[in-house]
Amino acid sequence: MFVPLHDENSLKSIRFQYVTLTLILINIVVYLFEVSRLEDVAIAGFAIIPRELFDTSLLPIPTETVGPAVPERLTLLTYMFFHGDLLHLAGNMLFLWVFGDNVEDAMGHLKFLLFYLACGVAGGLMHAWIEPSSESPLIGASGAVAGVIAAYLMLHPRVRVWVLALKAIPLRISAAFALGLWILIQIAMVLLPQVGPVAWWAHIGGLIAGAVLVVILRRPGVPLFDKGLGYVR
C-alpha cells in the first residue's frame, strides 16, 4: 500500500485551500478533545450506530448515563469528525491534505465543503444500510476522504504523486496508479468476509458519492480526466 506525500499539481483557481485546512484542523481539535475529555461511551454518542439510526422505536438512553450525544440523524455529520486512534486520524488527514486542495480548487470553497460533507453522509448511510442491525459505533472521516479520492482520480489521473511504498521506499507514480490501486483494495475488501474494525462499505459509499458529485459540482470549464491538459510523464 502507498502512503501519499505530495502531488505535483498546483492550484489554478483559488489562492489557498482554506476549507481543506479548516477540516483538518477541526478533526485534530476534536481528536485532542476526545483523548483528553471523553470516554469511549461518550464518543459513541456522536457515532453512527446503524440499529439506532434506522430503528426509531428504540428508547433513548438517558444522557446522564452515557454522556453527551446528538440526535441519531445528526450523527451522519458528527461521526466523520471523530477517530478511533492517532493512526486512524493521521491516515485520513494525510490523504485529505495531499488531494483535497485540488478538489477544492476544482469546485470552489463552499461547494467543496458541501461535497466533503455529502460524501461523509453517503459513506455513513452505505455502512448503515449494509449492516442495519449493527450496534457497533462508526466513526472516522474515511467515507468523506474516499469521496475526495474518487474526485481527484476523475479530475487528475495523469498527475504524478510522490508516495512511500511499503512505508519506506519513495516513488513518483501517477495518481491513476496510486489511487486506482487504493480503490481496488476497497472493492476487494468488501467482497471478502468482513473482519476487523474497518468499515469498508463506508469507503465504497464515499467513493460512489465522490465520483457522481464531482461531475455536478466542478466549476464550469474544469475538465475531467485531465482532458486537454499536458503533463510531463
Image (spheres, helix red, strand yellow):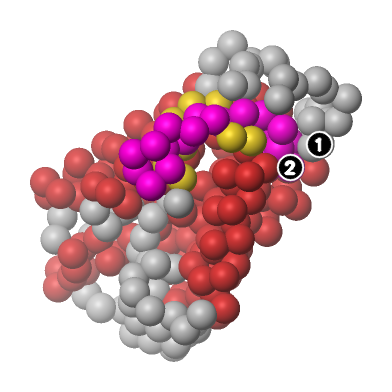
State the residue at coordinates (54%, 62%).
185
Q: Which residue is mark 1?
A: 224
Q: Is residue 50 above or below residue 202?
A: below
The dot on residue 131 is: none
In the rendered image of this protein, does residue 57 appear above or below residue 119? below
Name the image quarter holding residue 173.
top right
The residue positioned 38% from the left and 79% from the top of the image is 195
* Magenta range: 152-172
On the question of residue 98 being in view, the answer is: no
Residue bearing mark 2: 154
Q: Position of residue 229 (x, y in %)?
A: 82, 22
Q: Is residue 156 left or right of residue 135?
A: right
Q: Height in image: 133 above or below 182?
A: below
Q: Is residue 199 magenta?
A: no
Q: Name above or below for residue 28 compared with residue 72.
A: above
Residue drawn 24% across and 53% down? 85
